[in-house]
Structure formats: structure tokens, C-alpha cells
């Protein structure tokens, strides 16, 4: 599947993969796909959301490394990072740094965590607006340590229907990772990201 990212209705980046495992058949296929896209469109940048390397013996687990061979074919390295939501607590982001197998621009193509609009608690209570707000603050500080960071996109802007999300009285068939509720109400984390963007 090829995804075309758009900004202001002007297509700027071809994204050819999302978190695919680096195995020989995939590497060959995506390498050929990258070459084909370049042969028919040399005006747009090429990217893919790559996975971090598996932990290596003797390598500090505080460093996320990205040495996917597909990087050679890309103009931009994209990554998805949910530390603090899927595994670990938000403050664990303070220990992390990033290393890449090439000097190329980096985009954080997905990050975030869920909150139910109007559910208030302390910053350690999952699904609360305070937890999501705290997760955003910690994640943004972590991303600021990435050399070559050129952009980021939260997952997601607005809560959307998702039948498999069935946590009673929280999800009820909605993906709650939005910064805005399905009713158009901004959550606390919205203002954290807004302020971050304004300062950049």
C-alpha cells in the first residue's frame, strides 16, 4: 500500500510503508517500489515509517537505533513512537535518545495516547486528560533530542469511530487518542501541542 501524505492539498511525500519488519523479501519489494516511484515521480520526497532495531547485546536500552536498510532509499526517515502509552510510563521518555544509520531529516509520523474528554484525574491516571497532557509534554521533550527532526504529527487530531475499541464508559466504540473530542471539544493536550508548534 502506498500512502500519499498531504498538506494544504499539495502532495509532498510518498510514504511506502508503515512499521514493516526488515526481512529480505520486504527489503527487496520496498526497494523496488521506491525505485519505481522515483521513476514515475521525481518531484516528491519519499518516506516510510520504520521500526526501531531490536535491542542488541551490549547496546544501552536508553538509545533507540534505526538501521533499517530501507533508509538508504528514503529522503525522510519517519518513525512512530508511543512510549508512555504502549509500554512504560511517560517519564521513561526522559531516558531515551535516538541514533540513525544515516543523516537524513526525521519526522515523527505517529505519537500520542488516549483521553476521554471531561475525565479529569491526576497525571498518572490513564485515560484522563491530565495523563494525555503529561504524555504529550514528556514525548515532545524526548523528540526535541532527535538530531534532524523536521516535523511531527500526532495520532490523532479528532476522536473517531472504531468498533474494536470497547473499554466501557471510556472508549465505547471510539478511538480516544484525539486531541479534540468527537464533539469538537479540545482536550488539555491540544494546548500543549499548540504551544509547542507556536514556539517552533
Image (cartoon, rainbow, N blue to C red):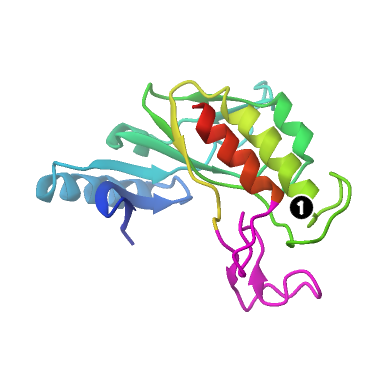
Give the residue at mark 1: 129
| Residue 84 in view (yes/no) | no
Asked which secondary structure carries label 1, the reply is helix
Q: Which residues are magenta?
A: 158-187
Quarter of the view holding residue 185: bottom right
Quarter of the view holding residue 91: top right
Nearer-the-camera pick, 102 or 188: 188
Please tell me how crowded label 1 is: few (under 14), some (14-19), or many (20+) other residues with Cα within 10 Å: many
Nearer-the-camera pick, 129 or 104: 129
Where does the image place residue 30, in percent across and percent down from the top left?
A: 30, 49
* Residue depicted at 19% across the width and 45% down the height: 35
Say if the magenta span includes residue 160. yes
Is residue 100 left or right of 118 when viewed as pictured?
Answer: left
Q: Is residue 98 above or below residue 167?
A: above
Count of numbered marks = 1
* Residue depicted at 65% across the width and 76% down the height: 164
| Residue 9 in view (yes/no) | yes
Q: Is residue 119 above or below residue 161?
A: above
Q: Main secondary structure of the magenta part?
A: loop
Where does the image place residue 100, in percent across and percent down from the top left?
A: 47, 25
Is residue 80 left or right of 74 when viewed as pictured?
Answer: right
Please state, as top left, top right, bottom left or bottom right, where the N terminus lies in the image: bottom left
Nearer-the-camera pick, 137 or 62: 137
Say if the magenta span includes residue 161. yes
Nearer-the-camera pick, 39 or 67: 39
Q: Is residue 85 above or below residue 103?
A: below
Amino acid at each position: 500500500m502506498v500512502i500519499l501524505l498531504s498538506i494544504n492539498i499539495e502532495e509532498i511525500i510518498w510514504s511506502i510503508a508503515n512499521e514493516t519488519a526488515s526481512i529480505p523479501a520486504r527489503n527487496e519489494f520496498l526497494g523496488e517500489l521506491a525505485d519505481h516511484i522515483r521513476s514515475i515521480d521525481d518531484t516528491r520526497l519519499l518516506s516510510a515509517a520504520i521500526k526501531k532495531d531490536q535491542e542488541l547485546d551490549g547496546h544501552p536500552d536508553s538509545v533507540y537505533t534505526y538501521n533499517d536498510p530501507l533508509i538508504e532509499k528514503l529522503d525522510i526517515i519517519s518513525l512512530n513512537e508511543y512510549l508512555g502509552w504502549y509500554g512504560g510510563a511517560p517519564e521513561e521518555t526522559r531516558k531515551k535518545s535516538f541514533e540513525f544509520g544515516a543523516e537524513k531529516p526525521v519526522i515523527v509520523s505517529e505519537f500520542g495516547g488516549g483521553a476521554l474528554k471531561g475525565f479529569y484525574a491526576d497525571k498518572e491516571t490513564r485515560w484522563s486528560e491530565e495523563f494525555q497532557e503529561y504524555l504529550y509534554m514528556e514525548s515532545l521533550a524526548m523528540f526535541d533530542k532527535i538530531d534532524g527532526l523536521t516535523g511531527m504529527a500526532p495520532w490523532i487530531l479528532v476522536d473517531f469511530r472504531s468498533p474494536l475499541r470497547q473499554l466501557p464508559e471510556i472508549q465505547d466504540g471510539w478511538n480516544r487518542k484525539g486531541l479534540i473530542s468527537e464533539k469538537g471539544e479540545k482536550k488539555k493536550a491540544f494546548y500543549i501541542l499548540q504551544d509547542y508548534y507556536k514556539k517552533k
